Image (tube, rainbow, N blue to C red):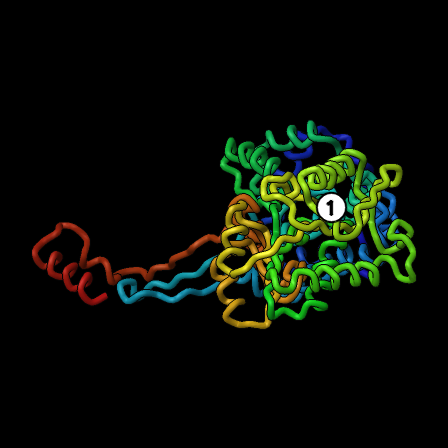
Amino acid sequence: MVSAPTAPAATQLSIPALFARQQGRAEALRREAVSSRAARLRRLDAWLTDNRDAICEALYADFRKPAVETDVTEIWSSQTELRHTLRHLEQWAAPRRVGTPMALVGANGWVQAEPKGVTLIIAPWNYPFYLAVDPLISALAAGNAAIIKPSEMTPAVAELLARMCRELFDEAEVAVVQGDKDVATELLKLPFDHIFFTGSPQVGKIVMRAAAEHLTSVTLELGGKSPAVVDETANLRDAAEKIIWGKGLNAGQTCVAPDYVLVHEAVRDELVAEMRAATQRFYSPGGRPVSESDSFARIVNDHHFGRVAGLLEDARQQGAEVAFGGITDAAQRFIEPTVLLDAPADSRIMQEEIFGPLLPVSTFSSLSAAVDVVNTHPKPLALYVFTQDKENQRYLLQNIPAGGACVNETILHLAHPELPFGGFGNSGIGRCHGHAGFLAFSNEKSVLKQRVGLTSLKPLYPPYTNTVSKMVGLLLRWL
């Protein structure tokens, strides 16, 4: 295990004073060797391994997240990103040579990544550990200082993040600032060099407006209604299992969870039957109620429970049929995995991001009709295509704009460190993970080095004689 620095006391600094301290430290971080960045990441990796139980306990305390889900979606995902970054950090940080056009013969050029400086990471409540640590990995790899603002809706994880950073980092390098939206507002008044925000499109607009005051660059990982399109050639049992897994993960509180299903009308009933069977296998083995399952999380708080339960009730009142599920229990913030059929297009459940274990299913008769339905909504964060027909796959991927996509899978594109992750339009701005995350927290400085003395362009300097004019004509014609 890599030894950690002695843990400093909890910060007593005001937010502006903490920011100023990180600004002072950022200049030293800019000049550090890449090996120093790697050492911080290795300390973080060791801490994640040593504190696995504490991470699981914090997630369970906040919304009864099953330990296996925490292991996979919070710890394994973080360490996958971290170790991928460590393997490639030297390469990413090295100057990248570029070619030289004929008109600039004698010069050479390269792109040099440099830290942006002091960065702000605003983490959400749904994956409160991973979605704080993942951008932190990229920020540290790129050589930045960082302030993390965790969600106040998951206090156990927020306190764990604060302890982690106290044990691993000087607060001039990494610090956690806890609090509600007033604290976030105070942070957003400061001239950060980059802001990484994960949350809703509505709050993302607030963050972007605040960043505009300082011309601060932003990465916005937002959300939206991510569709799953199932054609008549799909393996329906396989599709059902993957859709139910993607929807049931974290009780549907996932930004890339399937938000609705469009299925070819010829196979709807069979798909629904397979989804019912998959739900029983996953969460109700032996016929036990899902509410007794140790494999199903709860809604994070009473407010969000009321919102999701309200979507279910509105859909019912609008005429949607509950194919299975539908049980709710406010006392334990439990909502059963629920599939609804034929929810009207103007119902709330078909207009709002659900962020819960409700799944509307509608039919289509042609792929073009399915595309039209999806494209009436803002561009989704994810698109899920289930087909065994290559032409159908090509058509759907080509005609539905989305931040990312999976073919015959859900969710897992997010876990692939070589795939840039992010939204499109209403679902986000910028990319994260792997090299894309490193670049998000870096300034790509373009450098041209010219030789001393005669260069290819000196003959074109003023005065612009006839000879110069002829040479420019040749340049335009041949180069």
Q: Residue furthest left?
A: 466
Look at the image and tell me in which quarter the C terminus lies: bottom left
- Judge whether residue 384 can be spotted in this image: no
Count of numbered circles in the view: 1
Picture quadrant where residue 74 is located: bottom right
Q: Position of residue 380 (x, y in %)?
A: 57, 50
Picture quadrant where residue 432 is located: bottom right
- Which residue is nearer to you in this view: 86 or 20? 86
Q: Position of residue 374 (x, y in %)?
A: 54, 51
Circle 1: element type: loop
Q: Residues within 10 Å of mark 1 (few under 14, many from 20)?
A: many
Look at the image and tell me in which quarter the N terminus lies: bottom right
Tell me what residue is drawn at x 85 percent, y 52 percent: 56
- Which residue is nearer to you in this view: 180 or 160? 180
Tell me what residue is drawn at x 72 percent, y 59 percent: 272
Residue 425 appears left or right of 245: left
Residue 454 appears left or right of 138: left
Q: Position of residue 37 (x, y in %)?
A: 66, 55
Label 1 amino acid?
Gly
- Judge whether residue 286 can be spotted in this image: yes
> Disc 1 designates what residue?
356
**As drawn, 331 above or below 108:** above
Q: Position of residue 347 (x, y in %)?
A: 63, 40
Tell me what residue is drawn at x 77 percent, y 33 percent: 303
- Which residue is nearer to you in this view: 20 or 380? 380
Tell me what residue is drawn at x 74 percent, y 38 percent: 313
**As drawn, 363 above or below 149:** below
